Image (cartoon, rainbow, N blue to C red):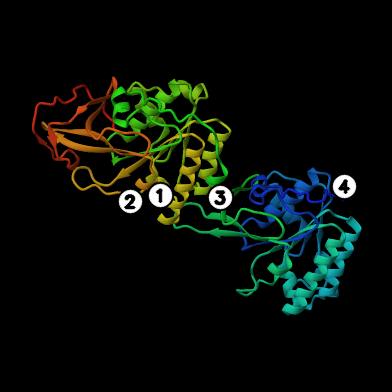
Amino acid sequence: MTDATPSTPPAEGARISTGVPSLDDVLCGGLTPSRLYLLEGTPGTGKTTLALQYLREGMARGERALYVTLSETTEELRAAAATHGWALDGINVHELVDEDGLDPDGEQSILHPSEIELGETVREVIARVDKTKPDRVVFDSLSELRLLAQNPLRYRRQILALKRFFAKRACTVLMLDDKTSETGDVQLHSIAHGVVSLDQMPREYGSERRRLRIVKMRGIKFRGGYHDLVLETGGIQVFPRLVAAEHHADFDPAGKSTGSAELDLLLGGGLVPGTNTLLLGPSGVGKTTTAVRFMVAALERGESATYYLFDEGLATLMARCATLGMDLRPHVEAGRLTITQIDPAEVSPGEFATMARHAVEERGSAFVVIDSLNAYLHAMPGEEYLILQMHELLSYLNQQGVTTLLVLGQHGVIGEVRTDVDLSYLSDCILLFRFFEAKGQIRTALSVVKSRVNAHERTIRELRFSGGGMQVGKALSDFEGVLTGLPAYRGEVAMLTGQAVPGDEA
């Protein structure tokens, strides 16, 4: 391959991109040039893909790129790149063990790595670098070099020698390691300027989860902890861990109507921007329909909204809302409403948080509905992580001035009702839905049991859905025991009447 035109070295203190913008975000700007970095991970975690993205980014910036491989052939690399729609044109690929290495009369033997002379291998790398003068180098992989060294001391000395050699030639090097060394072998970590670790976690059901962690990075600030990532056609995409404290925005905290005067009174003035409201109750009680009614009121005010649908089918939701007089299609067609159906078996928590960020920051959504948290819970590796993830996500949405609705289903219908996880302390407001029996009918009661921002009513009102929309009745002052599901009638409060629509429950 022909050499690239000479490139301009990065300015002092500048960073260079990894080829993955979201990874640059994790690194708070990218990599420090002219340093050696270790990219480690078990087979299948995406090391080669990330390495190719790194080199392609350099080529796009007019830099020379060299891929040194002991583990894959040039054709295998081309095939891997082709699956992402990439070509390796302009990237100099050098096989340290090629077809000549298979000659039994040759000095090297691919079948017996211990017979290969390590010094010759290193000298071949040096000669190739001196010839091509690359700005970016990928060395794949260190496990083969470790076999050639045969002992840790020799291996460390050779890595140090390569590090000094690359540094003198202003090369930014990415060394790949498949973590086949003995447990606890971290000598490479002390040599490398930075270490990026990739993990892959199989699950009982659904696709495997991949994540990334910056183990060390000298001289620069980075975002610690694990960051979810996906490996798909087109390369790796990283979802930086959400840190709510980094995101603040100015907004008007004045309360806004829910679209129902009675509900506004119950809530003490409507829904307040920068707060989240938990709609809590058993299945079929009307949580989703109430959430949609609140959202439609926001859409009619000209706000943009995003609805994340975990449980129900999109077509079913649209048809049911239209039957209740809440046609969502005009809002979707006008671009004010985005409804995203989420498969919790395929979407990681980090990816979901990134989707919410894009909805707020890029599409300007001021109203977000998550329906439901039960499915979101099952997408998480454990309840502890759900609480932490939801805390950061809700804090972020609140600080952006977003009005957030969370739907959480409970087990049971009448009598004892249970919840998978307690998220009540994270909620600014809680709307409690309950079934109760009266005059031979199953009816719905609604109450506000918590509000951090408004002096809300402590009454219990009846809620009903019909072809005319949502009806909220007067306070059930003549009933006792409504929240138990088996109330005692003590007066003359009239029940709501109207023709119910089949399937009007949430």
Query: To which residue does mark 1 refer?
Result: 377
Q: Nearer the viewer, mark 2 or mark 3?
A: 3
Marks 4/1 in contact by CB < 8 Å: the verdict is no
Marks 2/1 in contact by CB < 8 Å: the verdict is yes
The front one of 53 and 391 is 391
Q: Position of residue 291 (x, y in %)?
A: 37, 32
* Tag 1: amino acid: Leu
Packing grade of label 3 (10 A; few <14, some 14-19, many >=20) is many
Query: To which residue does mark 4 refer?
Result: 7
Q: Earlier in the sequence, mark 3 or mark 1?
A: 3
* Tag 3: amino acid: Arg
* Tag 4: amino acid: Ser
Q: Nearer the viewer, mark 3 or mark 4?
A: 3
* Quarter of the figure with the C terminus: top left
Residue 416, relative to residue 146: is it above or below? above
Q: Position of residue 490 (x, y in %)?
A: 8, 33
Q: Earlier in the sequence, mark 3 or mark 4?
A: 4
Residue at x 17% of width, y 40% of height: 485
Packing grade of label 2 (10 A; few <14, some 14-19, many >=20) is few
Query: To which residue does mark 2 refer?
Result: 420
